[in-house]
Image (tube, rainbow, N blue to C red):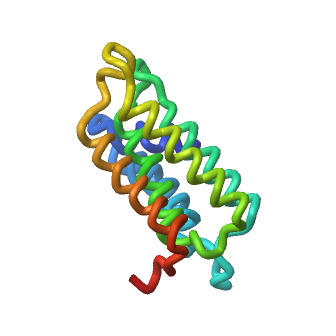
Amino acid sequence: MDVTIAVEVVSDPHQHPEVRLQAQGVIDQVKSVASGTANDDGSGINEAQAEGLLSLCAGLIATQEAAKAMLEKKLFGISLLQAFVTAQWQDLPDAFKQRVSLFVVDCCRQLCVAQPGVGGSTTYALKSKLSVLFADTARYMSTEVDPGNE
């Protein structure tokens, strides 16, 4: 099951509980990749997984207003990216850290600093989640703290 469909299914109370449980399993698997617990050997994320995760987050966050479960997809994408940043920042190459940082800034521009009438339906929940992600990214980028030893 695709992650975007899984988010739709989990957020739909009319879905059968077994289908929702299966969709939650897909979501939990992606969360484990973001938090670095997916690999049994404790090796963390590899470059292909990191690229795929960033691409997935970008797709979720870019969900258009007409899409089913738009807010849930955006919030999940932001949460996934935040878990990724806070759990695996130290393991990422510097060039990838730069890309993630620029992506977060771009998301903030698009979702929080939009002109009136453009993205005006941005909710407080999105702005709040993005501000925490922005702060975490800025802190890790500027100080190179170990996210696990705060």
Picture quarter with the N terminus: top right
Identify the image quadrant of residue 73.
top left
Picture quarter with the C terminus: bottom left
Query: Looking at the image, which residue is at 60% across and 53% down?
Result: 100
Query: Looking at the image, which residue is at 61% across and 50% down?
Result: 54
Observer-nearest of 43 and 89: 89
Observer-nearest of 126 and 134: 134
Seen as rendered, the residue at the extreme right is 48
Residue 55 picture location, percent across and down? 64, 45
Residue 99 picture location, percent across and down? 65, 51
Identify the image quadrant of residue 118.
top left
Residue 117 picture location, percent across and down? 33, 13
Question: In the image, 106: left or right of 150?
Answer: right
Visible in this render: residue 1? no
Query: Looking at the image, which residue is at 75% across and 63% down?
Result: 47
* Above or below 123: residue 36: below
Seen as rendered, the residue at the extreme front is 142
Question: In the image, 86: left or right of 13?
Answer: right
Observer-nearest of 2 and 147: 147
Question: In the image, 123: left or right of 55?
Answer: left
Residue 12 picture location, percent across and down? 32, 37
Query: Looking at the image, which residue is at 43% across and 43% down?
Result: 7
Identify the image quadrant of residue 41.
bottom right
